[in-house]
Image (spheres, rainbow, N blue to C red):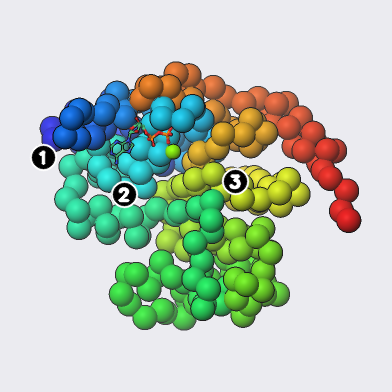
Amino acid sequence: MTQSTINPPFVTKGYACRVVDMKKEYVLKSETVRALRGVTFDVPEGDYVAIMGPSGSGKSTLLNMLGCLDKPTSGSLWLGDDDVAQMNDDQLADIRSKRIGFVFQAYNLIQQLTVVENIQVPLFYQGRSLSKEQHAKTIELAKLVGLGQRLDHRPTQLSGGQQQRVAIARSLVNNPYFILADEPTGNLDSRTTEEILQLFEKLNDEGRTIILVTHEDEVSKRAKRVVRLKDGRLQWDRTNSQEVREAAAKYAIENMPVEE
Ligand SMILES: Nc1ncnc2c1ncn2[C@@H]1O[C@H](COP(=O)(O)OP(=O)(O)O)[C@@H](O)[C@H]1O
Ligand SMILES: [Mg+2]
């Protein structure tokens, strides 16, 4: 077990997560790859962060750590009062299924299930049957993402944008520390990308924390903040002004291709 750099009580209230000198090394036969070389940053609750950086800079590694899919070699990742770096595999799996909302480029919906059932999937992983309240909540989430009229549709009966909205609703079902989105608009055309970005804005305005990886400037400009990685280090961390965000939204809408 690695040594935590900071012991509780450490102020985590008001933060979705705090990352302190986080390092991740992959030990291979011939070499050790230092994928993250000491990354420190905080994500306050309600933030909206875009992670950027060239291929190989450590974005996926960072996302895997934030999503509790793997744990740091050293340093700390605080989610609430827990340091993920100190957890065992069972604890990681537990926090991952209960407190992290994942959104993927390829939606990752279950084809046999309806919209509502797909939104409920993370609850079933917890091995209990659904309460009345939980069932009602999943319907509320479907409505929140604009799919209130499509509760019993299956993924094949939905557009790509609608499928991604189901995935976003599913990511919210566990009241997560944050929505973690890996290239969420990577498969979508510009009109549908805009639909998803507007949904993220709405969710963020309601106080939900969003962390996404993107390589598109148009997407990163819509976030409140951009964190750029290079060679496993944080190269810069900037706030997007309200003007930049609004101008990017305006540009996207004005340059939307005309519908056939
Ligand atoms: N599971 C792994 N085993 C060995 N090396 C890895 C593994 N995952 C990533 N790497 C290496 O770590 C570095 C960062 O990779 P990654 O986090 O995937 O970057 P990015 O997502 O920014 O392209 C790269 O050199 C990559 O080859
Ligand atoms: Mg990657």
- In this rendering, would 151 be left or right of 260? left
Marker disc for residue 1: 1
User: Residues under labels 2 and 3: Cα distance?
Assistant: 21 Å
Identify the mark at residue 204; answer none if there is no mark: none
Residue in the picture at 49% in, 27% down: 53
Secondary structure of residue under mark 2: loop
Q: Would you name the residue on which mark 3 appears? A: 186
Q: Is residue 198 visible?
A: no
Q: Is mark 1 within 8 Å of ligand 1?
A: no
Amino acid type for the residue under numbered disc 3:
Gly
In x, y percent, where is residue 58?
38, 31
The CA distance from mark 2 to mark 1 is 17 Å
**Circle 1 SS class:** loop
> Which amino acid type is shown beneath numbered disc 1?
Met
Instruction: Name the spot of residue 26 as percent of width and height, x first.
Output: 23, 35
Residue at x 25%, y 42% (from the top left corner): 71
**Mark 1 or 3, nearer chain start:** 1
Give above or below for 26 relative to 175. above
The structure residue drawn at horizontal position 79% and vertical position 34%, both measured from the top left corner, is 251
Q: Secondary structure at mark 3?
A: loop
Ligand 1 has an atom within 8 Å of the beta carbon of the residue at disc 2: no
Q: Earlier in the sequence, mark 2 or mark 3?
A: 2
Query: Farthest residue toward the front?
Result: 30
Residue identified by numbered label 2: 69
The C terminus sits in image quarter: bottom right
Ligand 2 lies in which image quarter?
top left
Name the residue type under label 2: Leu
Are discs 1 and 3 less than 8 Å apart at CB?
no
